[in-house]
Image (tube, rainbow, N blue to C red):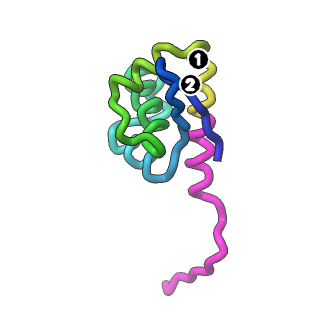
Amino acid sequence: MKQITVSDEYGNKYNLEFSKNTILAMEKAGFALEKFEVQPVLMTTLLVQGAFAKNHGRTKNETIEKIFDSLKNKEGFLKKLVEMYVEQTDALADEGEAEWEANF
């Protein structure tokens, strides 16, 4: 899995990534890539908060916002988060080993 590491003003490091559960929570909260153009602030907020959720789920939204606000090249950062999000959703469709059959 791909990760992005960011730091807060005190030097604490945060490893950002997505899992099936964090993506499910994001989508339940209203996140959808296709909504970025019409709701950029909300989608950016949900994407960034979702990236923290897997490894740092107890991090306050205020702290996440502060870290995001301090970042350089936010556009590049968001592109990498989207890439990680898409990679994780694509992984859900990967072929497994188990056989199945229909009875109809």
Q: Which residue is mark 2?
A: 78
Q: Which residue is mark 1?
A: 75
Give the image quarter of residue 73: top right
Looking at numbered disc 2 in the image, what kind of residue is underneath it? Leu
- Please give the name of the residue rendered at 57% of the width and 32% of the height, measured from the top-left corner: 81
Query: Does the magenta run of residues contain 77?
Result: no
* Contact flag, marks 1 and 2 (Cβ < 8 Å): yes
Outermost residue, bottom side? 103
Q: Where does the magenta region start and end?
A: 83-104
**Residue toward you, 56 or 75:** 56
| Label 1 element class | helix
Query: Does the magenta run of residues contain 88?
Result: yes
Distance Cα–Cα, label 1 vs label 2: 5 Å
- Please give the name of the residue rendered at 46% of the width and 14% of the height, measured from the top-left corner: 69
The answer to whether residue 64 is above or below residue 99 is above
Looking at numbered disc 1 in the image, what kind of residue is underneath it? Glu
| Label 2 element class | helix
Q: Position of residue 82 (x, y in %)?
A: 57, 33
Q: Residues within 10 Å of mark 1 (few under 14, many from 20)?
A: few
The answer to whether residue 33 is above or below residue 1 is above
**Residue toward you, 81 or 61:** 61
Give the image quarter of residue 30: top left
The answer to whether residue 41 is above or below residue 84 is above
Q: Residues within 10 Å of mark 2 (few under 14, many from 20)?
A: some
- Please give the name of the residue rendered at 57% of the width and 80% of the height, measured from the top-left corner: 100
Q: Position of residue 16 (x, y in %)?
A: 54, 37
Q: Is residue 87 left or right of residue 16?
A: right
